[in-house]
């Protein structure tokens, strides 16, 4: 057991994946000698060489296109998009090629491609480099979307993603790169599509991922001092979503709060709320509450960006209001 940062857990997972399987290689902008824009790949080029850790030109289309071709020939690429927002540049390759190729060949080929994307707000990168873009891909059957919210999950879910036979979008919250946590040296992969109950409670189910999971956890601690026990569920993946674990929690608490960093419309949080209403309506004592960012671009100014993000105080206040209502 050791204490490492979120970024170091991802780097270790990449190193172990490269060491475990010769078919695994990494491809992206400045990931080799430079160690990546956020230094997440530092040291991998020195250990594994330029044939396993490949720098590319500034072309997201080339990165994803080359990964698709390599996967069709039996390799297991790990592609990095420097900022998740840049997925818009290669959206066609991801949504229309990567996601559909296995289906359109009748299962004759698989595309075990993992795409790493630096996601999220809170670091002052402005509106074109700060979005949480996992919601863009919710309507792309064939993809798996992973959103690790802890050091242990960052390692274990990455290992699971690289071993998966289907394409996985692996979203790393850049606001969490320096967050610390415990990592077991022989931590096994976890199952993609399985939620985790982070905190048990009897009064309200709160569902949150990544940075919002961290803030919801602190809000839950504050509410516990008032006698309100929050059950915190981290989906860990938003495609597929583990509705069974979330629904079972709502059966116990009779209240649902979803906290997400992105705007509300077309989001995974809206999907969770709709599914719980459809499947567990009689379990609910109140309508589900969805705490989200405003329907605006992410502001650049520090104060505005922090106001845009749901805060611990806002999460706690809205939960109080739900239970009081």
Image (tube, rainbow, N blue to C red):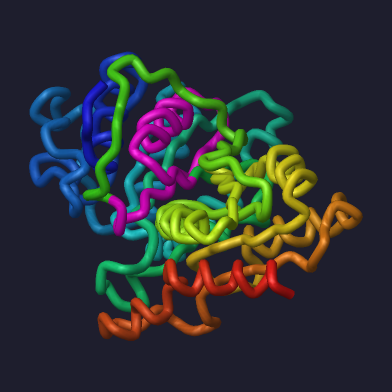
Q: Identify the residue at image location x=58%, y=28%.
A: 110
Location of the N terminus by quadrant is top left
In the displayed structure image, the side of residue 316 where residue 7 appears, left or right: left
Q: Is residue 90 visible?
A: no
Q: Position of residue 247 (x, y in %)?
A: 76, 45
Location of the C terminus by quadrant is bottom right
Residue 125 placement: quadrant:
bottom left
Q: Position of residue 92 (x, y in %)?
A: 54, 58
Q: Identify the residue at image location x=11%, y=33%.
A: 43
Figure check: 143 above or below 59: above
In the displayed structure image, the side of residue 241 where residue 297 appears, left or right: left
Q: Is residue 307 visible?
A: yes
In this view, the residue in front, 42 or 310, is 310
In this view, the residue in front, 251 or 171, is 251
Residue lying farthest to the right in this orientation: 282
Within the magenta stretch, is there residue 169? yes
Q: Identify the residue at image location x=65%, y=42%.
A: 240
Q: Position of residue 71 (x, y in %)?
A: 46, 30
Q: Identify the residue at image location x=50%, y=30%.
A: 112
Q: Position of residue 109 (x, y in %)?
A: 60, 26
In this view, the residue in front, 157 or 98, is 157
Within the magenta stretch, is there residue 198? no
**Total labels drawn:** 0
Query: What residue span does the magenta drawing correspond to?
Result: 147-176
């Amino acid at each position: 057991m050791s204490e490492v940062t979120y970024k170091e857990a991802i780097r270790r997972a990449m190193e172990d994946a490269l060491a475990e399987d010769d078919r695994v290689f990494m491809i992206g902008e400045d990931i080799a000698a430079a160690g990546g824009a956020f230094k997440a790949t530092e040291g991998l080029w020195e250990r594994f060489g330029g044939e396993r850790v490949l720098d590319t030109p500034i072309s997201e289309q080339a990165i994803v296109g080359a990964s698709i071709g390599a996967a069709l020939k039996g390799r297991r690429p790990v592609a990095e998009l420097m900022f998740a927002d840049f997925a818009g540049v290669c959206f066609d390759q991801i949504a229309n090629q990567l996601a559909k190729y296995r289906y359109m060949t009748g299962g004759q080929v698989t595309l075990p491609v993992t795409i790493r994307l630096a996601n999220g707000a809170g670091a002052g990168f402005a509106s074109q480099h700060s979005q949480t873009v996992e919601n863009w891909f919710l309507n792309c059957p064939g993809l798996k979307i992973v959103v690790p919210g802890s050091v242990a999950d960052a390692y274990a879910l990455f290992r699971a993603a690289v071993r998966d036979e289907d394409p996985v979008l692996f979203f790393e919250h850049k606001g969490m790169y320096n967050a610390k946590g415990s990592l077991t040296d022989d931590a096994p992969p976890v199952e993609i599509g399985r939620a985790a109950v982070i905190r048990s409670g009897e009064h309200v189910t709160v569902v949150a991922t990544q940075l919002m999971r961290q803030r919801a956890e602190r809000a839950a601690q504050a509410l516990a001092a008032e006698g309100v026990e929050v059950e915190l569920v981290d989906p860990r993946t938003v495609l597929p979503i583990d509705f069974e674990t979330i629904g079972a929690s709502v059966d116990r608490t009779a209240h649902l709060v979803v906290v997400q960093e992105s705007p509300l419309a077309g989001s995974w949080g809206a999907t969770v709320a709709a599914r719980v209403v459809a499947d567990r309506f009689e379990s609910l004592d109140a309508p589900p509450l969805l705490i989200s960012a405003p329907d605006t671009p992410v502001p650049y100014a520090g104060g505005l960006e922090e106001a845009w993000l749901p805060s611990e105080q806002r999460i706690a206040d809205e939960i109080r209001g739900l239970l009081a209502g």
